[in-house]
Image: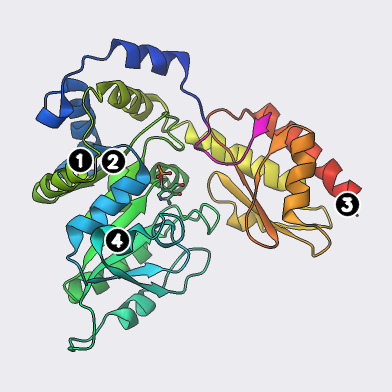
């Protein structure tokens, strides 16, 4: 099977497994796991933040960030189609107890003036606005990279209103590689960020939150309260260290394979792909009304290619560590022949 459903489907390589097996470990809840400590220091340094914290998942990392930034009853400005709103089980409402003030976006990118307009005036009727939330790259937007100038502009809006800025950087390394910026540059204007080890970096488990030391100290307390305190987690952290050392620059290959897929598919009369929108490791394919996303996905699955329907007239293809150039060539051939059978 050529699995293009998500970059979460990767399996750890033999070298990554060897590093995991050999990792020195201790009890991380006591702060005694040397490999976790090394990963947390490395992540903080890479992003130019004071401290970082390992979590089991991106969802937990995001929820810890929300919980630590806010108090119950606060409001958070976020794009309508962000993961934190759409795909985290409504956790913002029952873990942090915050409401999300959802603003429009184009391919996941919000405008600074819309952020400014969403900030609540101080009024007994209003929830206090506390935080602005961005997602870079943007998943539902199709792997969109936030322009750095826009992140800076939004951070100025946030500062002007005394708000914090968080970046859900589940795929921040894709953004950094695609825009040829350092990861630290991509998040310099934000107070805090989350990123995932288990997506483009190819680890089996793990995400991280990074930010000021006192913020991470409090997030660590919430992590324990939510059951995310892990013991000999160095086994997980070792995979993260391996990935940070070996799997960042190679994301360029994933981006090239996404472009290859898009180029080979884009001329088919039943699909709409804007090549300018293939920025990182995702290809969003708009479909003619005659093609049902579910039928196209089922047809391709029968021929050995997996991908997900993504709304009423779209499918999404995601490239990753376990997809070679030849897989992209083969997958595009199969998708084209299934499309031909639907004409
Ligand atoms: C942008 C974004 N944030 C957060 C997450 C959550 O990560 P996890 O699946 O590890 O909970 C995802 C997962 O796809 C994501 O795409």
In the image, the residue with mark 2 has its CB under 8 Å from the nearest atom of ligand 1: no
Of labels 4 and 2, earlier in sequence is: 4
Q: Which image quarter is the C terminus in?
A: bottom right
- Tell me the CA gap for discs 1 and 4: 24 Å
Mark 2 or mark 3: whose residue is earlier in sequence: 2
Q: Quadrant of residue 236?
A: top left
For disc 2, the marked residue is 208
The residue singled out by tag 1 in the image is 52
Q: Secondary structure at mark 1?
A: strand
Q: In this rendering, would 290 be left or right of 240?
A: right
Q: Earlier in the sequence, mark 3 or mark 4?
A: 4
Report the residue marked by disc 3: 342
Front residue of this view, candidates 151 and 52:
52
Query: Picture quarter containing residue 249?
Result: top left
- The Cα atoms of the two marked residues, 2 and 3, are separated by 43 Å
Badge 4 is on which residue? Answer: 94
């Amino acid at each position: 099977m050529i699995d293009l459903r998500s970059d979460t489907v990767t399996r750890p390589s033999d070298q990554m497994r060897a590093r995991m097996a050999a990792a020195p470990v201790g009890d991380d809840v006591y702060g005694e796991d040397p490999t976790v400590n090394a990963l947390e220091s490395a992540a903080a340094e890479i992003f130019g933040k004071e401290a970082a914290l390992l979590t089991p998942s991106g969802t937990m990392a995001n929820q810890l960030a929300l919980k630590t930034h806010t108090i119950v009853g606060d409001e958070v400005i976020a794009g309508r189609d962000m993961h934190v709103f759409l795909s985290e089980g409504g956790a913002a409402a029952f873990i942090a107890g915050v409401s999300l003030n959802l603003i429009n976006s184009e391919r996941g990118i919000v405008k600074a003036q819309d952020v400014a307009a969403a900030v609540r005036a101080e009024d007994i009727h209003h929830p206090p606005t506390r935080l602005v939330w961005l997602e870079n790259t943007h998943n539902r937007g199709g792997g969109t990279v936030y322009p750095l100038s826009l992140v800076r502009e939004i951070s100025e809006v946030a500062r002007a209103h005394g708000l914090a800025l968080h970046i859900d950087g589940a795929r921040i390394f894709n953004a950094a590689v695609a825009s040829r910026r350092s990861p630290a540059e991509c998040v310099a204007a934000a107070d805090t960020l989350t990123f995932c080890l288990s997506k483009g970096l190819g680890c089996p488990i793990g995400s991280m939150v990074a930010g000021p030391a006192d913020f991470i100290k409090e997030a660590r307390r919430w992590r324990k309260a939510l059951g995310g305190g892990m013991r000999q987690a160095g086994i997980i952290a070792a995979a993260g260290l391996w990935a940070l050392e070996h799997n960042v620059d190679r994301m360029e290959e994933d981006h090239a394979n996404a472009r290859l897929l898009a180029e080979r598919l884009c001329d088919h009369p039943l699909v709409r792909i804007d090549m300018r929108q293939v920025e990182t490791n995702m290809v969003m394919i708009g479909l003619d009304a005659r093609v049902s996303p579910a039928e196209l996905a089922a047809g391709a699955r029968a021929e050995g290619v997996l991908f997900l329907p993504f709304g009423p007239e779209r499918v999404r293809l995601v490239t990753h560590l376990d997809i070679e150039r030849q897989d992209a060539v083969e997958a595009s051939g199969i998708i084209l022949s299934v499309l031909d059978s639907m004409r």
